[in-house]
Amino acid sequence: MSEFPFIRMRRLRRKKLLRDLVRETILTPDDFIYPMFVIPGKGKKEEIPSMPGQFRYSIDLLAEEVQKVKEEGIKAIILFGVPEKKDEIGTDAWHEEGIIQRALREIRKYEKEMILIADLCMCEYTSHGHCGILKDKEVDNDATLEYLGKIAVSQVKAGADIVAPSGMMDGMVKAIRTALDKEGFADVPILSYAVKYASSFYGPFRDAAESAPQFGDRKGYQMDPANSREAVLEAELDFEEGADILMVKPALPYLDIVKTIRERFSRPVAAYNVSGEYSMVKAASMKGWINERDVVLEVLTSIKRAGADLILTYHARDAVKWIK
C-alpha cells in the first residue's frame, strides 16, 4: 500500500456531494416498518407517556392515521392491540371480533395497498401477561402452538399481509405455517421474531401495550443477552421451519447479531429498533443534550449497515421526512 501523502482519506470527504457519491449505506422509506397501537373505544388518541410522540388509537382513528402514514411514504405497519378484556388463554387474540381483527378489517376498507403486519403473540391478551398457555405458572410451549396457529389464521382472514410471531415458542413457525397452509394461505409470509432477547429495553412498549407479565419474567423463553451462538441456532430452526423473514430484537445492543444473521442466511433480515431505544433518544433530545435528527439517522444507518433489510422503528415517520 502506498504511504502518505499519496493516500489521503480526506479527499473524498471535503464536500457534501463528494460524501454523498461514495456513501456505502443509504436509508430509504422502503427500509421502514412503523409500529402502531390500537385500543378499544371511539375517537381516542392517547399519547404514550414513556414514548413521546407515539400514540394509541381507537380503531376509527387508527384507520385514518394509517392513511396519513402511507401518504408520508411508509409502506408497511405492524399492529399491536390492547383488548377490552383479557383471560387466561388470551381469547381476544384469535377471536373474529378481537381488536386486531376488527382493526385490520377497518383499515382494509380504506387502504388496499399498505402492507399490514400483525404481531402474533398472546402477552397482550392474557390476564397473566405471559406469551402462552400456562401450566403451573410456566408457559406450556406445546400447548401454546395450537393457539398461535389459530391466531395466525384469524389475522390473515381479517386482512393481514404478514404475520409476525414474537413469543419465542419452540416450533412456532412450523405450527403457524402448517395452520396457514391448511386454511389455504400458503402465500402469506411469516416474519419471525427469530432472535428475541430478554431485554431491558422493552419497558415503554409494555406500558403502551399493557403487556407486562403479572408475575415472574420472560427469561425462560426469550434469549439470554449474553449468547450469540444460540442466536444462530434460533434463526436456523426458524429458517428450516419456513420463516420468510428473520428478525433480531432489539437492534442497537445486538448489531453484531444482525450482522451474523445477515451473513449466515439467504432470507431478508429485519431488526426492531425497540421502545427503550426510541425513548432514550427522545428523552435526551427533549433535554437538549443531543440533536434528535442527526442521532436518529445515525442510529438507523447503523442498523442498516449491520445488515438489516427492514427496520421496525418508532422513528419511521420522522425519518422519512428527514431523508427526502
Image (cartoon, grey):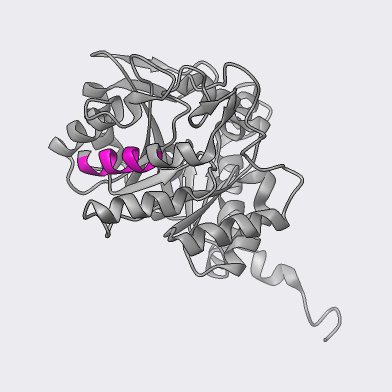
Q: Position of residue 273 (x, y in %)?
A: 55, 41
Residue at the left extreme?
109
Determine if the magenta segment contains residue 21: no
On the image, which quarter does residue 11 sit in? bottom right
Left or right of 169 in this view: 116: left
Q: From the viewer's side, name the closer residue of 89 and 268.
A: 89
Residue at the bottom extreme?
1
Identify whether 276 is placed above or below 256: above
Q: How many marks?
A: 0
Q: From the viewer's side, name the closer residue of 210 and 256.
A: 210
Q: From the viewer's side, name the closer residue of 281 and 195.
A: 195
Q: Position of residue 322 (x, y in %)?
A: 45, 44
Q: Position of residue 214 (x, y in %)?
A: 57, 16
**Residue 123 appears anywhere in the view:** yes
Q: Quadrant where the N terminus lies?
A: bottom right
**Residue 324 appears anywhere in the view:** no
Residue at the right extreme?
3
Main SS of residues in magenta: helix
Identify whether 19 is placed above or below 156: below
The span picked out in magenta is 148-157
Q: Residue at x 69, y 44 (%)?
A: 253
Determine if the magenta segment contains residue 149: yes
On the image, which quarter does residue 42 sit in? top left
Left or right of 39 in this view: 219: right
Q: Position of residue 321 (x, y in %)?
A: 40, 43
